[in-house]
C-alpha cells in the first residue's frame, strides 16, 4: 500500500481556538493513534527514559538505591543512566522469567534480593525503592505487602514506585506517583517559620536565580530543595518547612499529601517567559505570604536584556519544541508578544495550554501546532525555514536552523530564566553555532555507593548488581523488520518502543522506518480492545502506507494472553494486507526475537521454488546492528562476498528488502553471520533445501576461509575441516555473539600463539558451533567465575564487562557489542573496530 504525497498533521492556532479545549483533535491526542517515537521524543516518551524518568527521579532521595523488578526489556535504557550519569551501584535488577509473567513467582525473591543488595554495599542505604512495571500492575501485585516483607528481611526502609506507561493519561501517571513517593517518607516535625521548600523539579534552580535572593529578602532563612541534600538526615529537614512552593503541576498531588500529613500548605507558581507576567506573579506571591520585596533591579536587568534582544535581533523566526525548560505554548506567546515570528510548535496539547493558546491566537493565529507523537510526523517536510529552533526535538525537524536546546538540569526560573534564554539565543546567532545537548549543564549526583569486593556473586536467581539488561527480543525483531518496508507495531504503551528506537536501533537517527507503539492504556490492556488497535493500524496505513504489518510482542500482551494469531488473522481480513508477527515477550534476548522475525517474513513472503531452479545468489542472514561490529560492516561484508565472483549477494533486511527476500528460495547458498542468522539459515535449509555456511569474516584470512567454503558448495565438494593449531602458550576468552567470536578464535589460533581459546556469551549459542570449554552464561556472576577458573591471559569483550572483573590482571581487548552497551562504546568504522584484533 503506497500513499501519494503524505503530510504531517498540524493545526493552526486559530483552528484549535475555534474548536476549544473540549474538542482537541484526535490527531493531537496520543491514545487515539499509534505512537511514533521519533528521534525528537526519545528523551521523554518512556517513563523510564533519558532525562528524569521514573528511575532517575526516584533516586533523587539521598542515600537511596533502587531495585527494578521487571523483564529485562524494561531496564534496557538504564545502561546509559548507570554508566554515563553517575548512578552506578544505585540501580539493581531482578529479572523476571517467562514463568514469572504468568505466575508471579518472582515476588518471593524480592525480600531476599533487597537484603542481598544492602549486604553487598560498603555503606548500607537508608532507603530501598522497588520499582515495578506494567507486569506487576496487571498482575495486581500488593506492593505494600511486598515492601513490608522486604523491610523486615533487610532491616531497611522499603518503598515502591511504578514505571507504568499504561496510566500515562490517568489520574496518577508514573511521574505524578514518583513525585508523591519522593516525599512520602517525611514525618511531622516542628515548623520553622523561616523555612520553605521548593518542590517540582529533580534538580535545583540555577544558582544565579533571583528567586533565592527575593525569598531571603522576605525573611526566609532556609530554602530546601531535595536535589541539594547529600544525606537522609538533611532530607528530613523538608518536614520543618512553613510552606511549599510548587513549580511543576505534576507535584500538586505530593503537595496535597504533604498538606494533609505534615500540615504544610503550598503555593503553585509557573515558569514564565513573559516579562510582565513574571513581575506580576512575584508580586502576587509575596503579597500572599504577606511580604514586600523589591525586585526592581532584577526586572530592570531582564528588561534591558530583552530590549537589546529586540533591537539587535529583529525578524528572527522560531520553531519551538517541548524538550525545553519551558511550556512551549507560553514561550511561543512570549516571543510573539516581543515581536518575533513563531512558525511552529511541536508539543502535546492539553486543556491547560489553552490559557496561552487563546492569547497566542490574537497575535499569531497562523502558528502551526504539531504533536511529536503522531505517526504522520514521519512525513514532516520543511515548507518554510526558520532561523532558530528552541528545544532538541524542534532541531530534528528543522535540521538547517541554529538550535538552542535550553534543557539544562540547573532549572531556569524568573527573570534570570528569561535572561539566560535570550543570551543563549544571541550567542547562537552571533557565533552561528548551535547550543545542543552537548552544551547543556548537568547536575551532579550527590549520593554515591561502592560495592564490596566480594559481592560479585548473587545468591538470588535473576539478581543483577553491576550490569543492566541487554537488548531484548522485541528489539531484535524490530531490527530485522526495519528495512523491509512494513509497518511495525509494538504492542505496548510507549515505553518499550522508546527503548527499541532510543537504545537498540542506531539506524533510527539516520534512516526512517515505520516503527510505532500501539499506544495501549490500562483500559485497553484490561479489556483486550483489539478492535481499537486495528482502527489505529488502519488509520496509520491510510497515512503512511506499508507493504505489511508486523506485530511485535512485549510483556503486556504476554501477561494478558493476547491471541496474536487471531489478531493477525482478523487484521488481514479487515485491512486486506499481510500481517506477520514476532510474538516476543520482552524476557528473551534480541537474537531470539530476530529469528522469530526472519521466520515470519520467510513464511509469508519467500516464494516457493521448484527443485533445480537455483541461481547464483548468495543470501546473507543475521546482519542486524545488534550483531554486527559497526553500521558499515554488513555493506563491506556484502561487497567482499561479491568480489569472489561466485554470484550476487543479498543482505536481507540491511540494504536489501522485501523484493530480495521474495526470491530468497532461489539462492545457491546462504551465509549466517550471527546466531539469529544461523537459525534463519537452518530454517531456509529445512524449507527450501539451501545449504549454508557460518561466517562473520572481517580480514583477509577469514574471507579466504569463507571463499573456500562457498566455492566448495558451488562445486559440490565436501567441506574439509582444518584442525586448530594450539601450540602457543596464551589462553584467551571471547565474549560476543557466537559467530563473530568463533571467527576471531580461528584467526587467533592461526597466529600460533594460543593453546586455549574459549567462547562464552549471554545470548543464544548454537550447539553445533560450540567447542570444548565454551559456555552459555545466564547469571551475571558466571562471567567472573569463568574468568577466575580459566586463568586467561586475554579477554575480548564489550567494555561494560570490565565491571564484572575489576581484579583481572591480563589484557582486555575492547569488542563493543551494541546489544550490550548501545551507543556508549559504539565505533563508527570497521577499520577502527578491527585494528585491535587483526593478526596479520
Image (tube, rainbow, N blue to C red):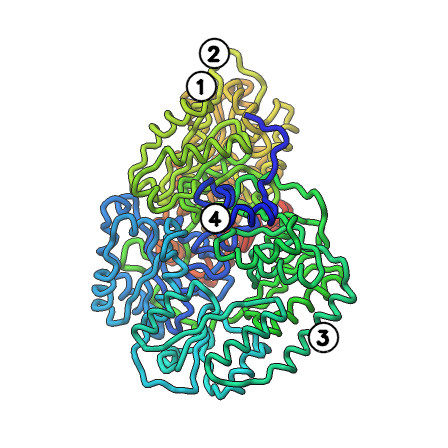
For label 1, the crowd category at 10 Å Cα-Cα, with few meaning under 14, some 14 to 19 and many 20 or more, is some
Indicate the secondary structure of the residue bearing disc 1.
loop
Sequence-wise first label, 4 or 3: 3
Is 128 left, or right, of 3 in this rendering?
Answer: left
The residues bearing labels 4 and 1 have C-alpha atoms spaced at a distance of 39 Å
The residues bearing labels 4 and 3 have C-alpha atoms spaced at a distance of 43 Å
Q: Depth check: 545 or 81 in front? A: 545
Which mark's residue is nearer the viewer, 3 or 1? 3
Q: Is residue 382 above or below residue 681?
A: below
For label 2, the crowd category at 10 Å Cα-Cα, with few meaning under 14, some 14 to 19 and many 20 or more, is few
Q: Is residue 532 above or below residue 236?
A: above
Which mark's residue is nearer the viewer, 4 or 2? 4
The residues bearing labels 2 and 1 have C-alpha atoms spaced at a distance of 9 Å
Residue 315: name its quadrant: bottom right
Look at the numbered discs 4 and 1 and tell me whether their residues touch, using CB distance below 8 Å. no
The residues bearing labels 4 and 2 have C-alpha atoms spaced at a distance of 44 Å
Sequence-wise first label, 4 or 2: 4
Residue 498 has which mark? 4
User: Is residue 727 at least partly visible in the picture?
Assistant: no
The residues bearing labels 3 and 1 have C-alpha atoms spaced at a distance of 78 Å
Look at the numbered discs 2 and 1 and tell me whether their residues touch, using CB distance below 8 Å. yes
The residues bearing labels 2 and 3 have C-alpha atoms spaced at a distance of 82 Å
Question: Percent from the top left, x then y, of residue 23?
Answer: 48, 46
Quickly name the residue at label 1.
689
Sequence-wise first label, 4 or 1: 4
Which mark's residue is nearer the viewer, 4 or 3? 3
Quickly name the residue at label 3.
304
Which residue is pictured at 49% across the width and 33% down the height?
539
Quickly name the residue at label 2.
611
Indicate the secondary structure of the residue bearing disc 4.
helix
Is 47 left, or right, of 779 in this rendering?
Answer: right
Which mark's residue is nearer the viewer, 4 or 1? 4
Amino acid at each position: 500500500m503506497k500513499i501519494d504525497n503524505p503530510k504531517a498533521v498540524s493545526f493552526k492556532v486559530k483552528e484549535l481556538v475555534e474548536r476549544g479545549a473540549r474538542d482537541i483533535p484526535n490527531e493531537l491526542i496520543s491514545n487515539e493513534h499509534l505512537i511514533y517515537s521519533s528521534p525528537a521524543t526519545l528523551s521523554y516518551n518512556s517513563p523510564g527514559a533519558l532525562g528524569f524518568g521514573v528511575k532517575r527521579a526516584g533516586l533523587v532521595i539521598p542515600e537511596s538505591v533502587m531495585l527494578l523488578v521487571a523483564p529485562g526489556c524494561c531496564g534496557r535504557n538504564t545502561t546509559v543512566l548507570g554508566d554515563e550519569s553517575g548512578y552506578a551501584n544505585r540501580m539493581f535488577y531482578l529479572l523476571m522469567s517467562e514463568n514469572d509473567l504468568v505466575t508471579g513467582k518472582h515476588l518471593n525473591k524480592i525480600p531476599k534480593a533487597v537484603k542481598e543488595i544492602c549486604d553487598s554495599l560498603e555503606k548500607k542505604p537508608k532507603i530501598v525503592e522497588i520499582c515495578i512495571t506494567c507486569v506487576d500492575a496487571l498482575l495486581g501485585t500488593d506492593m505494600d505487602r511486598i515492601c513490608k516483607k522486604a523491610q523486615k528481611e533487610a532491616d531497611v526502609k522499603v518503598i515502591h514506585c511504578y514505571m507504568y506507561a499504561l496510566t500515562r493519561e490517568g489520574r496518577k501517571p508514573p511521574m505524578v506517583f514518583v513525585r508523591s513517593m519522593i516525599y512520602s517518607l517525611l514525618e511531622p516535625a516542628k515548623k520553622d517559620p523561616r523555612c520553605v521548600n521548593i518542590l517540582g523539579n529533580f534538580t535545583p534552580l540555577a544558582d544565579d536565580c533571583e528567586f533565592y535572593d527575593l525569598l531571603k529578602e522576605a525573611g526566609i532563612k532556609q530554602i530546601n530543595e531535595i536535589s541539594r541534600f547529600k544525606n537522609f538526615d538533611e532530607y528530613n529537614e523538608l518536614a520543618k518547612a512553613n510552606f511549599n512552593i510548587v513549580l511543576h503541576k505534576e507535584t500538586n498531588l505530593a503537595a496535597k499529601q504533604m498538606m494533609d500529613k505534615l500540615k504544610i500548605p503550598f503555593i503553585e507558581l509557573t515558569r514564565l517567559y513573559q516579562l510582565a507576567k513574571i513581575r506580576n506573579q512575584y508580586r502576587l506571591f509575596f503579597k500572599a505570604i504577606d511580604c514586600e520585596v523589591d525586585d526592581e533591579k532584577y526586572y530592570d536587568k531582564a528588561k534591558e536584556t530583552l530590549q537589546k534582544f529586540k533591537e539587535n535581533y529583529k525578524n528572527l523566526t522560531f520553531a519551538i519544541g517541548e524538550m525545553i525548560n519551558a511550556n512551549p505554548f507560553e514561550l511561543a506567546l512570549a516571543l510573539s508578544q516581543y515581536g518575533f515570528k513563531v512558525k511552529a510548535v511541536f508539543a502535546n496539547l492539553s486543556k491547560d495550554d489553552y490559557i496561552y493558546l487563546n492569547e497566542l491566537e490574537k497575535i499569531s493565529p497562523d502558528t502551526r501546532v504539531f504533536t511529536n507523537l503522531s505517526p504522520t510526523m514521519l512525513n514532516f517536510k520543511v515548507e518554510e525555514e526558520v532561523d532558530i529552533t528552541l528545544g532538541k526535538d524542534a532541531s530534528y525537524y528543522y535540521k538547517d536552523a541554529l538550535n538552542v536546546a535550553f534543557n539544562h538540569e540547573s532549572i531556569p526560573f524568573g527573570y534570570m530564566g528569561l535572561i539566560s534564554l535570550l543570551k543563549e539565543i544571541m550567542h547562537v546567532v552571533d557565533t552561528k553555532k548551535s547550543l545542543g545537548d552537548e552544551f547543556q549543564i548537568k547536575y551532579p549526583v550527590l549520593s554515591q555507593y561502592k560495592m564490596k569486593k566480594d559481592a560479585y556473586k548473587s545468591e538470588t536467581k535473576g539478581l543483577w548488581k553491576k550490569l543492566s539488561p541487554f537488548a531484548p527480543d522485541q528489539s531484535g525483531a524490530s531490527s530485522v523488520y526495519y528495512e523491509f518496508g512494513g509497518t511495525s507495531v509494538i504492542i505496548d504503551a510507549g515505553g518499550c518502543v522508546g527503548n527499541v528506537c532510543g537504545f537498540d536501533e542506531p539506524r533510527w537517527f539516520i534512516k526512517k522506518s515505520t516503527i510505532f507503539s500501539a499506544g495501549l492504556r490500562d483500559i485497553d490492556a484490561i479489556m483486550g480492545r483489539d478492535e481499537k488497535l486495528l482502527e489505529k493500524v488502519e488509520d496509520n496505513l491510510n497515512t503512511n502506507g506499508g507493504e505489511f504489518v508486523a506485530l511485535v510482542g512485549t510483556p503486556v500482551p504476554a501477561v494478558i494472553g493476547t491471541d496474536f494469531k487471531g489478531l493477525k488473522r482478523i487484521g488481514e481480513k479487515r485491512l486486506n494486507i499481510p500481517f506477520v508477527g514476532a510474538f516476543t515477550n520482552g524476557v528473551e534476548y534480541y537474537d531470539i526475537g530476530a529469528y522469530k522475525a526472519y521466520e515470519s517474513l520467510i513464511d509469508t513472503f519467500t516464494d516457493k521454488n521448484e527443485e533445480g531452479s537455483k541461481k547464483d545468489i548468495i543470501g546473507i542472514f543475521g546482519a542486524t546492528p545488534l550483531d554486527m561490529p559497526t553500521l558499515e560492516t554488513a555493506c563491506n561484508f556484502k561487497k567482499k562476498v561479491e568480489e569472489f565472483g561466485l554470484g550476487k549477494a543479498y543482505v536481507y533486511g540491511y540494504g536489501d528488502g522485501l523484493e530480495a527476500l521474495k526470491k530468497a528460495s532461489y539462492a545457491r547458498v546462504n551465509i549466517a553471520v550471527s546466531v539469529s542468522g544461523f537459525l534463519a539459515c537452518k530454517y531456509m535449509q529445512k524449507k527450501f533445501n539451501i545449504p549454508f555456511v557460518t561466517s562473520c569474516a572481517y580480514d583477509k584470512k577469514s574471507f579466504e576461509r569463507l571463499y573456500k567454503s562457498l566455492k566448495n558448495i558451488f562445486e559440490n565438494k565436501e567441506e574439509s575441516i582444518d584442525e586448530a593449531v594450539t601450540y602457543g602458550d596464551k589462553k584467551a576468552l571471547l565474549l560476543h555473539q557466537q559467530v563473530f567470536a568463533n571467527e576471531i578464535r580461528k584467526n587467533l589460533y592461526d597466529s600460533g600463539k594460543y593453546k586455549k581459546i574459549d567462547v562464552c556469551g549471554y545470548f543464544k549459542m548454537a550447539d553445533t558451533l560450540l567447542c570444548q570449554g565454551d559456555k552459555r552464561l545466564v547469571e551475571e556472576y558466571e562471567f567472573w567465575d569463568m574468568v577466575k577458573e580459566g586463568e586467561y591471559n586475554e579477554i575480548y569483550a564489550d567494555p561494560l564487562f570490565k565491571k564484572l572483573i575489576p581484579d583481572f590482571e591480563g589484557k582486555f581487548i575492547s569488542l563493543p557489542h551494541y546489544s550490550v552497551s548501545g551507543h556508549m562504546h559504539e565505533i563508527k568504522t570497521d577499520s577502527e573496530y578491527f585494528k585491535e584484533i587483526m593478526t596479520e
